[in-house]
Amino acid sequence: MSFDIIRAGRAILHVTDLNKSREFYDALGFVETDSDEENIFYRGIEERNHHCLWLKKKPEAAVEAISYKMASEKDLDALHAHFQRQGFQTKWMEKGSQTAIGRTLRIRDVSGLPIEFYAEMDQVNRMTQQFHLHKGAKVQRIDHFNCAVPDVEKAYDYYVKQLGFSCSEYTATEEERIWAAWLHRKPSVHDVAFMNTPGPRLHHVGFWLKDPLSLIDACDVLAAMGRGKAIERGPGRHGLSNAFFLYLRDPDGHRIELYNGDYFTGDTDFEPIRWALDDPMRQTFWGHEAPDSWFEEASEVLDIHTANKISIKEPTLKKRKPNFVI
């Protein structure tokens, strides 16, 4: 590859009430870097980039973009040339048009998802040792995106063969059709996962915690605030990825995963782990089932050119209930 995608970088979510959103994300221990009447910019405790989560006040909840960080401006230009050769319609957001970030490149990917790439973002102080300010789940950093797409194999092939992602784990049918896949650029289990379900939609954004107890702290804080209904699933351990998880819904229904405990995937001889579709331990290692909402609901995404919601298509593989993954 002539370009280097480093990792999942940020998510841009539209929300309808900034005050309600602030109460929720502050409770989880996100650090508010900046805000005004229309926007809130959050980061994790250990992050030096200005933000990993941008909340925009809008009439309807939606996903504007999910973003990946590039190694340099040169890599960003090389990626743009790559997309142009393949006939993608691209959109540049020039430096200064967005808070704290350099120019960004947006595309609608092969699944229809609004994807953004950037190399430059303002730097801020890490809060790692400001222990007296840590609270809630003590969110450390952004980790991954999980995306609902109608054709997982199409997404898998493009991200692996064209964008240089590697596969850590996958679920396959008896006919060896890929049902879901976990792909990464950084040496962890995933920067993005794709699942076979109506899409394109964003199922969740995953954020890394420093330890499993932080998941319990999040539950205690939300319950004490009278926000226990925000807890959708967990705490628990996934079979896929081996990670501890907790799924929450913010006031607009956007799903957030609090996540800890996956493993290193950086060895060049790493072999992807295959899971059978009918293996119940792949989703929840301990055996408890997820609620129906977790299978059926996800955030709608916007077209990068028109800002309209993108039509949802049914999956190409036959729909079965255990279709969502981590």
Image (tube, grey):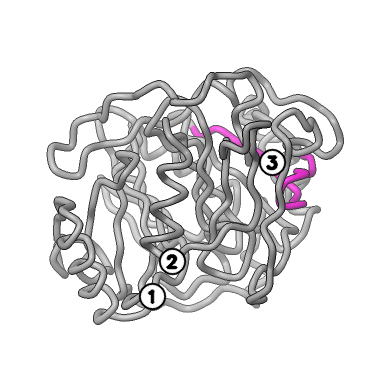
What is the number of the mark on residue 164? 2
The answer to which of marks 2 and 1 sits earlier in the sequence is 1
Type of amino acid at the residue the image marks with label 2: Gly
Q: What element carries label 2?
A: loop
Q: Is residue 259 above or below residue 13?
A: below
Disc 3 vs disc 2: which is toward the camera? Answer: 2
Q: Do the residues labelled 3 and 2 touch (CB within 8 Å)?
A: no
* Residue 304's disc number: none
Q: Nearer the viewer, residue 184 or 131?
A: 184
| Residue kind at label 1, given as amino acid type | Asp
Secondary structure at badge 1 equals: loop
Q: Which residue shows up at 31% across the image and 81% down it? A: 72
Q: What residue type is labelled 3?
A: Leu
Q: Which of marks 2 and 1 is in front?
A: 2
**Is 240 in the magenta?**
yes
Mark toward the start of the polypeptide (3 vs 2) = 2
220 and 237: which is toward the camera = 237
**Magenta segment range?**
235-250
Marks 3 and 1, Cα distance to the nearest angstrom? 31 Å
For label 3, the residue is: 246
Q: Residues within 10 Å of mark 3 (few under 14, many from 20)?
A: many
Label 2, label 1: how far apart the Cα atoms are: 8 Å
Q: Earlier in the sequence, mark 3 or mark 1?
A: 1
Query: Which residue is disc 1 drawn over?
Result: 4
